[in-house]
Image (cartoon, helix red, strand yellow):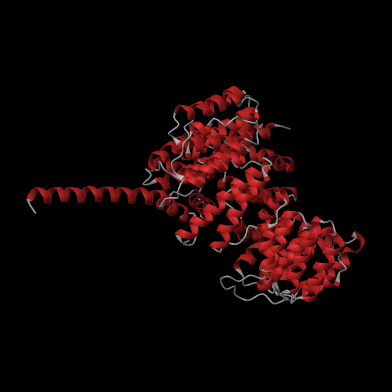
Amino acid sequence: MNVNTVLRLLITIIWFSAILLHSSDVLADQETVDWWKAQRKATIILMEEETSIAELVANLNKATPENAQDVMFKVSVFMRAGMNKETIEALQELKALSPQMEGFQVACIYDDACDNVLAWDVAKATVEVFADNLSEIALENRLLKYFLNSGWTVEKVDKWLAVMPKGKQNFWVKERLRFNMKHGRGEALVKELSDSVREDPQDIEGAIEFLDALVYARYAGYKKWELSWMVETIKPKLVTQAENIASRLKRLTKWTTAIKFYRQTIDIPLSEEESRKLGMMYAVHVPVERLRSMFAAHVREGMSECLLKLGKKSQAQKWMVEAADIREKHNLGLNALFAGQVQAASGQRIIEGRIKEKEKKSEDDPQYWRERAQYYRGRSEHTQEEEALLKGLTLTTQQSEPEQHHRGHVDWRSWLLVDYALFLMREERIDEVVALLREEIKQAPAVSESAKRAANLLAFDLYKQISVDDPVLWNWLTNQPKWEHTEERLLWRMLENAKQDNLDKYFIKAEEVAFGKDPSRAHTLGWIMNRMHFPKRSIPLLKYAVENTQDKELKERAVFTLFESYMDTGDWKHAEEVFPDAAKRLTPKELPEWYSRVAVAAAKAGAKADAMHIWSRVANLNLSQIDGLEDLAEAGLRNELKNFYRKMQKEIPSSEVPAKALMVLEKK
């Protein structure tokens, strides 16, 4: 190896090393930029360490940020302080240090600006500065709504949207089209976008983005757009591109045009590279051959669905059968519901014949009968559907739920029970479905999956039909080791259905079942009582749960509900006492809002000095939090609050909050 070769090799190594180092620095930066981390840090410094927000602002103005996360922290503090101009400058600094920051982090800043501090200029600047980073964010019901309410015309909003870049996944184009469609002026933009696609037909991804925009906007003033021109104009070379176009056209109900692209999808072979990309969509490894067969069945079913919508029943039948053949050959499972729908329209019974052929071999398999029922549901042949469901149920047994679910575990009784219950509900046989579910709860082991699902259906779907006097339901609740979401909802609905005059009797009964048992019961009943407006009665139960549980998550939930009950009874002192623990359930955004309620409660109780002390802590945590200010003023703290915000005006001159607060306080 000569000297020149060695030098070239060394230069190449150094060059690649530099790239890797730069890439790792960028990746490390992206990984550490976290809005919630910045918010938590600010909360700790301002609330737990009790650093003055004015002092923290002064320190940040002097300091030079070392990295993007430091700037994110500065954004958090400046927003809290109501320093909108400085916040916007920090956002620009953040963009420079973290140009590829995740859209989720941008959305967090934006949501806080819109919903928490009501800093619309900051919200606007956030999406402008990070426009390239966004693939989704709630514009329509927040910022765009604010624009219109504040006097912007539709034309002005459209111009603002028009100058934005495409964003990720064509975000800004989609938002602009939806906005214009909603306001009855989208057709010109649709023409502009379609002309752009026609001018560059080789840009297949651009054509897909165009269709995505139409799909995105179709709920806002949907029009029957003419898209048949795409067949002759757009010639995808990759099968996945053809499928992407076909599936979007199907969503737009362009059945004929979609069929043309589905035909291309079937004709173009799936490449190894495309198979690899398809495999990346799954959390577990799927063999290439299985991926190919799944994709092949999927596109044929898409083709069949479009043909069915056009009334071409025999052709729909042909492609559905092809898909079913692929599924059977590769053991993918029959799409029984869809097969039934197609055959109901075509009048043919090929798939039914195949299903019946398997009966002798699978007659003792509940999965077979569930699939058979789905087929008949697709055909709308209710008698056969019910027969299959009942047959499947008779093949299952009621059994306790295993402590650990092994891979592949399926409780077919639970699935069939729910299917049959939903069938009866569709048939409006309500008395029968209630009797079915009650019998399951009565006969099955208390900890069985089927009994739990039966209780869930009663609690959420049939709650008007349950009785607080039902011994079956009380017995099931009594036998549950822990009370979780289903038990909570069931007991809540039972108690709500009790006559108000007799409610105390049932509360006593529930308390007897809850006290002295697993703390989850006491918390559940306490929470129910709070939601039913009996906060005073809930307090002993909630205290029992807090004091006796070893479950950290349950303790946090119980102490927060206890805090709510103290607040609902006007006991602000105990509420403040438990607030540090209750606050663990709150986000940095929610914390000052809830803490401010304690200040209001103290003021209404006549504890003015305490109320002012608590409010000053709230303001220190988030100066922009002024909800409750009028209540405090009416409780006799108007002058104290005026003095407080005049002081804040001097300490943080660039904050916009003191002036807003003083305007509120000047109102009599």
Of residue 282 and residue 38, the one placed in the foreground of this image is 282
The residue that appears at 69% across and 38% down in the rendered structure is: 638
Q: Quadrant of the N terminus?
A: bottom left
Of residue 313 and residue 158, the one placed in the foreground of this image is 313
The residue that appears at 46% across and 35% down in the rendered structure is: 129
Q: Quadrant of the C terminus?
A: top right
The residue that appears at 65% across and 36% down in the rendered structure is: 219
Q: Please provide percent x and percent y for residue 649.
A: 55, 35
Of residue 163 and residue 388, the one placed in the foreground of this image is 388
In the displayed structure, 441 sits above or below 299; it is below
Q: Please provide percent x and percent y for residue 433.
A: 82, 63
Of residue 297 and residue 546, the one placed in the foreground of this image is 297
In the displayed structure, 250 sits above or below 470; it is above
Q: Please provide percent x and percent y for residue 369.
A: 70, 67
* Side of 427 where 259 appears, left or right: left
Question: How many numbered circles does the render carry?
Answer: 0
* Side of 98 where 578 appears, left or right: right
Q: Quadrant of residue 575?
A: bottom right
The residue that appears at 68% across and 56% down in the rendered structure is: 337
Quick check: can you spot residue 54?
no
Q: Please provide percent x and percent y for residue 106.
A: 50, 42
